[in-house]
Image: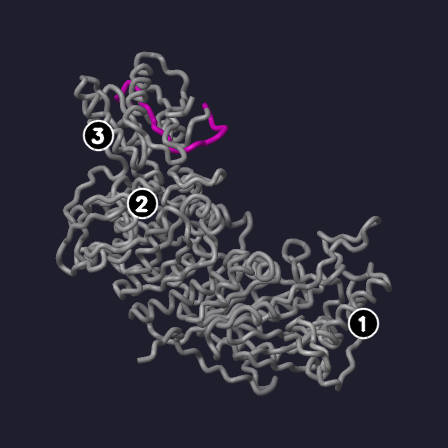
Amino acid sequence: MSTTYVETKPTQELEPFKGVKKVPYAEYFTSGHRTCEGCESAQFMRLIAKAAGPRTIITGATGCMYVANTSYYATPWGIPWMHTQLGAAGSSALGVAAALKSMMRKGEMKDEPINVIAFCGDGGGADMGLAAISAAMTQADYNLLIVMYDNESYANTGIQVSSTSPFGVNTTFSTPGKKKRIMHNRWKKNVAGLMIAGHPSCKYVATVSTSYALQAMNSVRRALTIGGPTFIHCLNPCPKGWDFDPATALEVGNLAVNTGIWPLYEVEKGELKLYGKTKEIAEGRFKRLPVADYLLRQGRFAHFTDEDLAYFQSQVDDMWNNWLIPGVIPLRKQEKNAAPTT
Amino acid sequence: MATLTAPVKETRKFEEQEALITGSEAIAVACKLANVDVITAYPIRPYDTVMQYMSQLVADGELDCEFIVAEGEHSQFEIVKHASACGARTFCGSSGVGWMYAMEALTVTPALRIPLVALVGNRTLDDPGAFGVEHNDALSVRDLGWMLVWVDNAQEALDTALIAYRVAEDRRMFVPLAISCDGAFLTHSQSLVKIPAAEQVKKFLPRYDRGDLLLHPDNVISVAPQANEDWVMEMRRQNYAVTERACDVIREVYADFERIFGRKYGNPFFEEYRTEDAEIVLLGMGTLSTPVKVTIDKLRQQGKKAGFVRLRWFRPFAGKEIAKSLERFKAVGVIERDLSLGSPDLSGVVATELRSAMYSHAKTRPPVLDFLCGLGGREVTVEDVEKITDLTFQAAKGKAEPLTQWIGLRG
């Protein structure tokens, strides 16, 4: 007799959308929010809702996608949505999933696959709520997807640094000044890498971009279909916080990828797949653009000197040249002809 | 390690049983009888034995429930909060600074109209880290919309847990309820408890029905959008309306409890012990009732007319009722197992609230003295209570100062 150690409920079979023209018209996130012109985070909310469809329950942590997004007496959500606390994306997802599982098993609720999604910003995900997300990623019994929309700051409270803010960035908590030009000398935390490296029960992790909208939606659908705890990290250019023309949000998102700063990949059950321009960069078919092309498009780096740009470039070069898996695992590549250590 | 006693494990469908169990185990069996759907656990003394019992019940198939061990109390309470929003009957608990770690989650739970039932194994707040009983942990949520009740024996713990689900899940309420059991003195001490039959409980406790507030794809709602000064006040008024109804709901439920289970609690809000012809009364919450009652009996034999009022429900605070009861005495001595540093007259929470009720509703103004005693888990001894009654008798004779005193302190 073999023991079933982990028991997940069946998930919805969400096939990937086979092209932009095949994406359904139905919107489950529509007007009723008051986010900024060019807000890629709101765009991501729309993509998530569209990808997941109506048999979904979604919780949203405090942040821009709460305060600017869902303000009483209106709501943009065409699926059931509940606010949760800044550091509670992980725990809210577990709560919903556990309730559904228990009540369906006990016959207290109609048994059907319902998507469980929780979203948070980088503040709520990489900082305050990291422990809760990590805990959720170990709970193999539950189907849930945590999505972190990353506008590289605590945007809602007026653009303050978080653990995913890029090196040297100008924010209201890292203001360049007469004595110190660089107040934020921390390097961006690799949250997706954390999820991959540290959580054996997590079967799907992806980095996505709203500039690659189709893939972003299909990542959501893949995660929800695979089941178990899953995680998606999306980079979301923020016209207000990053200081660029809102009409160019898509372009800015592409530059993040094309400079190699934001690698795009999926890890499904331990298998890594790069995609988009990241794949071309890794295969040598596309030469990374200089980071200055991306950084100097944004007012938040206007204070950067050539030295700062060179330093930033060197770190990105180091990642691409020396990491075992660029963007994913920062362990040093072994020298090919090195003598064995044992 | 906590092992379940047989009657707790094997509750019977039609038969009441009796068992020698702790306060924690009593709460555990109540959760089993209530058929809870989702439980979250996190270790901290002294409440966490209840979760050890829950783990055993789930593992043995005695309770069908999701049992999640969270990575911290904040997550612990967030998980059950959202589970409850989706219609699950939930149980949770903590002690001391663990409860404080959950504070953000605790704050939003009543505002969201979530009928969570929680056990607080009352414990001194750090620092210093101490395991013994103090009441400040549970009291810290008193302004936020939580219901708060103190029990003093395992039978009352079990009964009150069943009552708690019925009260909290009443659609007129839909707010969380914390049951306080004194750390160690109740959580870990055993007494004989009658465990009701499962069928009896079914009659008493209907299914949790969240109605149109249910978070489910068939009910597309947005719960707790961000609000500003144009709407927050009206939302608060709704929570306030719950508190206006609370006493009536509680009375109804206790009456039904008595009808179904045959155990009579009388006035739900406070217990009166030998107050009929008392000159002075003592007042307190929780297990200090035992040394107090022993002392009252002893004093009565000496011809001293003292009585005791044990407060059960702290929220809602039945101020009018308490004031009407206490106004006939010559003095009141509150035995306070908490601190409220910097408060008026430096009194603890209970005395301060009591004086407020007396001021508004009592026809006469007996002195209300506050005795800080039994803090950090120190026993409230018969000797302490004798001293307290002595001082309260003196207050009745006119010596009503100081208003706050420390009893049982070294040196």
Residue type pointed to by label 3: Tyr
Q: Residue furthest left?
A: B15
Give the extent of the magenta segment. B327-345
> Quick one: SS at disc 1?
helix
Disc 2, disc 1: CB below 8 Å?
no
Q: Nearer the viewer, mark 2 or mark 1?
A: 2
Q: Which residue is mark 2?
A: B187
On whether residue B335 falls in the magenta region, the answer is: yes
Q: How many marks?
A: 3
Provide residue B175's location: percent of width, then percent of height.
37, 50
Q: Are marks 2 and 3 on the same chain?
A: yes
List x then y, in percent, for residue A6.
40, 73
| Amino acid type indicated by mark 1 | Asp
Label 3 vs label 1: CA separation? Answer: 81 Å
**Kind of residue indicated by mark 2:** Thr
Q: Which residue is mark 3?
A: B273
**In the image shown, does A326 or B2 lie closer to the viewer?**
B2
Is A267 drawn above or below residue B352 in the view shown? below
